[in-house]
Image (tube, grey):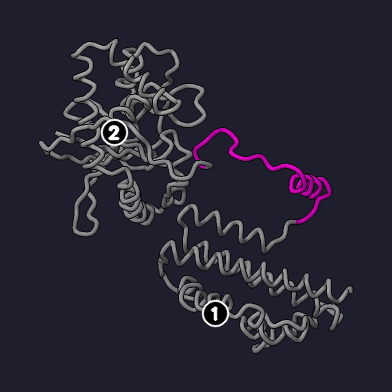
Amino acid sequence: MFIFKQILELPFMLSIPSAIYPIKMNDTVYKLDIRNDSYCVSMQGSDSPVIFFVGSKKDAEYFIQASNNKSLALIKNRTTITLTKHNNTNNYLTPNNEDINNEISAQYRISGTEPEIENKINEIFKFNTRDKVHNFLDNLSKKMTSRKLFSPVEGYEFISIINKMLRLYIVSFNDIFASEISQHELSSTNLGGVLYISQHNDDVIDINTLIGKLPTITKTNYFIHQDEPLEKFKHAISTGKEVDASLLLISRAKNLLEKSAYRSSIIEASAALENYIAIKLIDRLTLKLGSTDEVKKYLRKNENQRFDYRCKVIFKELYGLSIAENDPKLWERVIASRKNFRHKVTHSSLEPAESDAREAVNCYFDLITNTQRKLEELKLTNNQ
């Protein structure tokens, strides 16, 4: 029998007893094993999580002792959730030469040209007994079969199942420290994402992790900013410069996208756009009207509060530029997104898809940058 376990650690604790909790989703009942007392065995000093075992403290300690590996560490987890699937197939895949070479190259970390790799693999086979070779091929067959039966991307469905449970948990117990999760948050946990363990009967044949994007899991720098951007940042923090509020809101929106908080990302991005327009209008109106009170009174007039009126009419009166006319196709995207998602997200419980949220954030940001670029061009032209 093939067994496929998906395990994740929440970035918080659930205040419910450790037990099996059935949950129904899309006419299917899943059994979630929720544990508050689990431990993991990990490699000490690793740049990213390398997990060898997840289970009770007693079993984890036994695993370390039996391994006789001083590099292993025992770590207490927060709440872990496990979903187990089974398959009784007898149709095993047969590895070909390419499968065998790839597996040996991965196990022994062999690199080089294709002939060099093949020579090294042949040398490895020479020094192994017939039984060892047979066991290697048998294990590889089982691993390949398991990977065909159970795809690692099922981890995303697993996260969706967990989020349904979490939404009901949050409302049932009014737990303000719990929240829905995404791959982004899971990458920062002890397990480093959705851990999946494949077994054939009682034998573990494969351990891997669905990690998502690299920056959320690695503990080393994947990029170092240098030169002019770094100097600008150092100057900004040393002189007490205030942050550009619109750009900060956009950055928050993009971060929320990575966390699958699609409603919030749209709201933040929309606020960034409206804030940008308002600041530009206030700058010119202050020069024109002089008094801050007069500017506020002007913008509070009913007709002057509408977003499209501000962008088309008032902006053109003050800057000689209609935002809608500057890039008509982009303007159409912004208006469509505001109508279909921004307004509904603000006034209803609509849950937008990732693609719709990403489109909203991108087109709002593009409208800001395109408008700013055009204003800078006009300024240069006027200076000339």
Q: Does 171 appear above or below 144?
A: below
Q: Nearer the viewer, residue 365 or 256?
A: 365
Q: Residue at x 47, y 47 (%)?
A: 184
The residue singled out by tag 1 in the image is 332
Where residue 113 sits in the image (x, y, percent)?
44, 27
Indicate the quadrant where residue 276 lies.
bottom right
**Range shown magenta:** 216-242
| Amino acid type at image mark 2 | Ile
Q: Residue at x 52, y 56 (%)?
A: 256
Q: Crowding at label 2, few (<14), some or many (≥20) Cα neighbours within 10 Å?
A: many
Count of all numbered marks drawn on residues in the image: 2
Real-space CA distance between mark 2 and mark 1, rounded to the nearest whole angstrom: 48 Å
Q: Is residue 233 magenta?
A: yes
Among all residues in the image, which is located at the extreme front? 115
Tell me, for residue 197, which label it has, or none.
Answer: 2
Q: Crowding at label 1, few (<14), some or many (≥20) Cα neighbours within 10 Å?
A: few
Check the picture and name the quadrant holding the N terminus: top left
